[in-house]
């Protein structure tokens, strides 16, 4: 399960990076920043953001079992945990997009509009 969170984070990093490179006018495809952003960023996103997502899912599951909200491995509990997992993946997508945008702006020193 941990590797799927890292893989998902890496794929989202690549997709978000491609979208941001297309929309940010100052971002240049042919520069030294591009391979650093995509290659290094992909591994960092997989390790850090994928790890955070994995810990979030595990922590949520542990909290629900400890609070006795989920007491048995029923179909209803499985559906609830699956939905919670999807919500964590959605939050991970948003976080990766924000981090990727911040990284591109920092690498190309794009000034924020006032």
Image: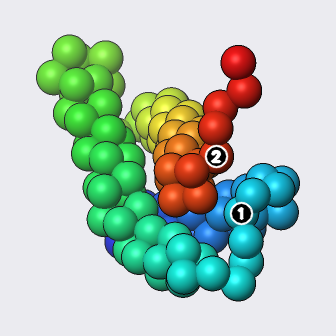
Q: Quadrant of residue 47?
A: bottom left
Q: Quadrant of the C terminus?
A: top right
Q: Give me the C-alpha separation between circle 1 and circle 2.
A: 9 Å
Residue 80 location (% of width, % of height): 51, 31
In front here: 11 or 33?
33
Mark 1 and mark 2 in contact? Answer it, CB < 8 Å.
yes
Residue 57: percent from the left, percent from the top?
35, 42
Q: Is residue 113 above or below residue 4?
A: above
Query: Label 1: few (<14), some or many (≥20) within 10 Å?
Result: some
Mark number displayed over residue 68: none
Q: Is residue 11 left or right of residue 46?
A: right
Name the residue carrying label 1: 27
Q: How many labels does the image show?
A: 2
Secondary structure under the numbered disc 1 in the rendered image:
loop
Q: Can residue 22 be seen in this view?
A: yes
> SS class of the residue under badge 2?
loop
Query: Residue 71 appears in which quarter of the rendering?
Result: top left
First of labels 1, 2 by sequence position: 1
Rendered location of residue 100, percent (x, y):
56, 53
Q: Is residue 68 left or right of residue 78?
A: left
Q: Name the side, left or right, on which 80 lies relative to 44.
A: right
Read off the residue under disc 2. Answer: 110
Q: Around disc 2, counting alpha carbons within 10 Å, would you say few (fewer than 14), some (14 to 19), or many (20 or more)? A: some
Quarter in which the N terminus is drawn: bottom left
Q: Foreground: 9 or 86?
A: 9
* x, y percent for residue 61: 29, 35
Q: Residue, x 64% and y 46% (percent of image)?
A: 110
- Please indicate whether residue 52 sits to the left or right of residue 66 in the image: right
Q: Which residue is drawn at 59% across and 58% down?
A: 108
Which residue: 83% across, 63% down? 22
């Amino acid at each position: 399960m941990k590797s799927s969170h890292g893989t998902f984070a890496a794929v989202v990093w690549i997709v978000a990076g491609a979208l941001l490179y297309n929309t940010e006018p100052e971002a240049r495809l042919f520069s030294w920043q591009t391979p650093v952003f995509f290659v290094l960023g992909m591994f960092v996103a997989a390790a850090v953001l994928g790890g955070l997502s994995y810990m979030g899912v595990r922590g949520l599951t542990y909290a629900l079992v400890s609070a006795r909200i989920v007491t048995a491995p029923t179909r209803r509990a499985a559906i609830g945990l699956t939905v919670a997992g999807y919500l964590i993946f959605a939050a991970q997508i948003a976080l990766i997009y924000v981090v990727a945008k911040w990284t591109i702006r920092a690498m190309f020193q794009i000034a924020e509009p006032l």
